[in-house]
Amino acid sequence: MTDDLCKVSTLARDFYTFYFDANHLLFEEHFPCRAVCPGSLLIDMVVSIISKTNAGSVAFIELEKVKFIEAVYPGKKYLLTIKHDTESDSNGVFYIHTESKKRFTCGRFSIKYKECDAICLTL
């Protein structure tokens, strides 16, 4: 994801703010009269952030039960919260919401580590 499309700021571990540039060419083509962020763009952002916080040890990230509750609009600021399960840091949930906690998108994630890292994690 390019920096000119999405601006992400870290608030604390697993808490982020973000917004998409409403003037980006992508949004001229995706519902031009009332631009919305495509779901694939939201998923790409979530996967990218989870991958970066795991410093190169991720083989892939699996998302499940992703719900697009309401449209996410470019130019508006949103929050992304990532909560890891207490039993396993490699599983958890994510929420895209506003400061008032109104949810727009949510789902579960599971991180699959590279084989050499998975062995090290179990020792």
Image (spheres, helix red, strand yellow):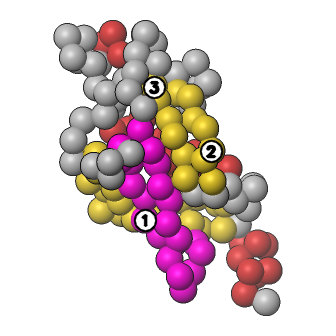
At 27% from the left and 49% from the top, the residue drawn is 102
As helix, strand or loop, the secondary structure at mark 3 comes to strand
Amino acid of disc 2:
Thr
Residue 48: percent from left, percent from top: 58, 45
Dot label at residue 20: 3
Q: CA distance from mark 3 to mark 1?
A: 22 Å
As helix, strand or loop, the secondary structure at mark 2 comes to strand
Q: Are marks 2 and 3 in contact (CB under 8 Å)?
A: no
Q: Are marks 3 and 1 in contact (CB under 8 Å)?
A: no
Amino acid of disc 1:
Val
Label located before the other in sequence (2 or 1)? 2
Crowdedness of circle 1 by 10 Å Cα count: few (<14), some, many (20+)? Answer: some
Q: CA distance from mark 2 to mark 1?
A: 17 Å
Amino acid of disc 3:
Phe
Check disc 1 and report the residue beneath it: 93
Residue 97 falls inside the magenta stretch:
yes
**In this picture, residue 24 sits left or right of residue 67:** right
Where does the magenta region start and end? 78-98
Label located before the other in sequence (3 or 1)? 3
Dominant secondary structure, magenta: strand
Dot label at residue 10: 2
Residue 7: percent from left, percent from top: 56, 28
